[in-house]
């Protein structure tokens, strides 16, 4: 996220208030989900894994979604 110039506070805001657009219950070591949020109009995807036992969340990655790959305001991957 630092290489992509995505601010830590923006990621935390998205983790707290972002929209879940996909869930991956079979991911290991923890189930994860893809979140969408906007920071100053900039769309950002954040993938977070959640440890259900401890309640902890782990940011796996944060990135700018590619307009060529996403539709519906970055909520749905385009079929290719």
Image (cartoon, helix red, strand yellow):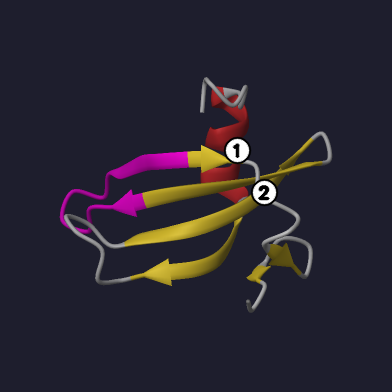
Q: Residue at x 75, y 68 (%)?
A: 71
Magenta stretch, residue numbers? 49-61
Q: Is residue 36 above or below residue 79?
A: above
Sequence-first disc among 2 and 1: 1
Question: Left or right of 31: which side holds 23?
Answer: right
Q: Is residue 11 above or below residue 74?
A: above
Disc 2 to disc 1: CB gap under 8 Å: yes
Residue to which mark 1 is pinned: 13
Question: Left or right of 2: which side holds 78?
Answer: right
Secondary structure of the residue carrying numbered label 2 = strand
Q: Is residue 46 above or below residue 35?
A: above
Whole-percent x, y for residue 7 in the image = 60, 23
Whole-percent x, y for residue 67 in the image = 75, 55
Residue to which mark 2 is pinned: 37
Q: Is residue 66 above or below residue 79?
A: above
Magenta segment: does it hold 14? no
């Amino acid at each position: 996220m630092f290489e992509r110039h995505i601010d830590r506070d923006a990621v935390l805001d998205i983790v707290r208030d972002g929209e879940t657009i996909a869930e991956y219950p079979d991911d290991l070591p923890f189930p994860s989900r893809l979140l969408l949020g906007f920071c100053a109009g900039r769309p950002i995807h954040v993938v977070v894994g959640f440890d259900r036992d401890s309640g902890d969340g782990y940011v796996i990655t944060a990135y700018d979604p590619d307009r060529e790959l996403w539709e519906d305001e970055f909520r749905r991957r385009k079929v290719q």
